[in-house]
Image (cartoon, rainbow, N blue to C red):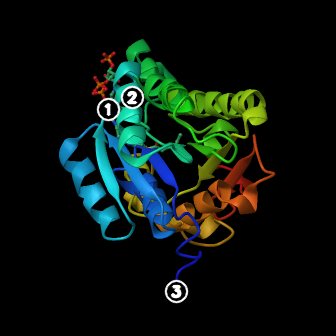
Amino acid sequence: MATYRPSLFAGCNAVVAGGTSGINLGIAKAIAACGAKVAVIGRNAEKAEGAAQALRDIGPEAMALIADVRDFAAVDAAMAHAAQQLGPLDFVVAGAAGNFIAAADALSSNGFRTVTDIDLLGTFHTFKAARSRLREAGASLIAISSGQAFQPMWGQAHASAAKAGIESLVRTLALEWGPAGIRVNSLSPGPIAATEGVKRLVPQSRIDAIASRLPVRRFGSAGEVGNAAVFLLSPAASFVTGMTLFCDGGMMLTPYDG
Ligand code: HXC
């Protein structure tokens, strides 16, 4: 049974940066299932085309665009292409991210910069490039954040700082772009099964223990994050801007054991 009305986003156009796999592909699928045309931006052409094909099976139209979000000119060209092919953009999700575990003592300057460039600068690039291509009065933007923006986690100085920056950026853009009818929110997923993030951050041996400490006693799915994204993008959230929606099974309620 569909969670939302399949025509909820009929006539709407969306871009999901990082939407070629994992949580962001789950979001792209949820948007497509509501009838929007969707473009995904990724670095790998094969992966991006595979994602677009999967989206074509769900929604009215999908396209794959290649850009590294660290490169503003490339993101700008991708957004221009998306708007030209699909029409004015209603929804933009800035989800491209990079991560690895490294204690601050073992983290080089370039390692810190690489992750903050992908996550934080990439989010700014994505929204900045989309701005002039948005259908104003009703456009809705989402940045993908993390509980680590608020709660430190060992080995995550780079990613936590980047996500904290994203939280701040979202609030400033909500303030500055609100008068034009553009809402900007943050979506903060918890541990989502079978994703690159869990693979990189959670040792296999700890998965059951971590799940058992979550109030809901399980990891989430990309589809569940997709449903939360659809809510934020939809008119049901028309008075919600500059906020963070945690879609984390209650993870933020549990102390992190380090
Ligand atoms: C220490 C590392 C490292 C590691 C890379 N570096 N991996 N340092 N431990 N495991 C350092 C390198 O040594 C180098 O610094 C610098 O980082 C750049 O590395 P490159 O490999 O040259 O960078 P690049 O090819 O651009 O790749 C970026 C990447 C890569 C982030 C390192 O893993 C990637 O492309 N990831 C994309 C997919 C991804 O990570 N998805 C997971 C998202 S999960 P030096 O000093 O040697 O030059 C997620 C969950 C969020 O976001 C929840 C928490 C916030």
Contact flag, marks 3 and 1 (Cβ < 8 Å): no
Q: Residue 75 carries which label?
A: 2
Type of the residue with mark 3: Met
Callouts 1 and 2 close, C-beta under 8 Å: yes
For label 1, the residue is 67
Quadrant of the drawing holding the C terminus = top right
Residue displayed at 56% across by 38% down: 134
Q: Which of marks 1 and 2 is nearer the N terminus?
A: 1
Q: Name the residue under label 3.
A: 1
Q: Identify the residue at image location x=29%, y=47%.
A: 64
Q: Which of 100 and 50 is in front in this view?
A: 50
Residue drawn 54% across the image and 72% down it: 7
Badge 2: how crowded within 10 Å, few (<14), some, or many (20+)? many
Q: Which amino acid does label 1 sit on?
A: Ala
Task: Point out residue 233 in the picture as x, y percentages from the top left corner.
Answer: 63, 54
Asked which secondary structure carries label 3, the reply is loop
Decide if residue 198 is in sight here: no
| Tag 3 near tag 2, CB within 8 Å | no
Closer to the chain start, of discs 3 and 1, is: 3
Q: Which of the 4 quarters of the picture holds residue 57? A: bottom left
Within 10 Å of disc 1 (Cα), the crowding (few <14, some 14-19, many 20+) is many
Q: Is the distance from the Cβ of mark 1 to the nearest ligand 1 atom less than 8 Å? A: no
Residue extending farthest to the left is 46
Give the distance between the C-alpha atoms of the residues marked 3 and 2, in whole angstroms: 36 Å
The three-letter code of the residue at mark 2 reads: Val
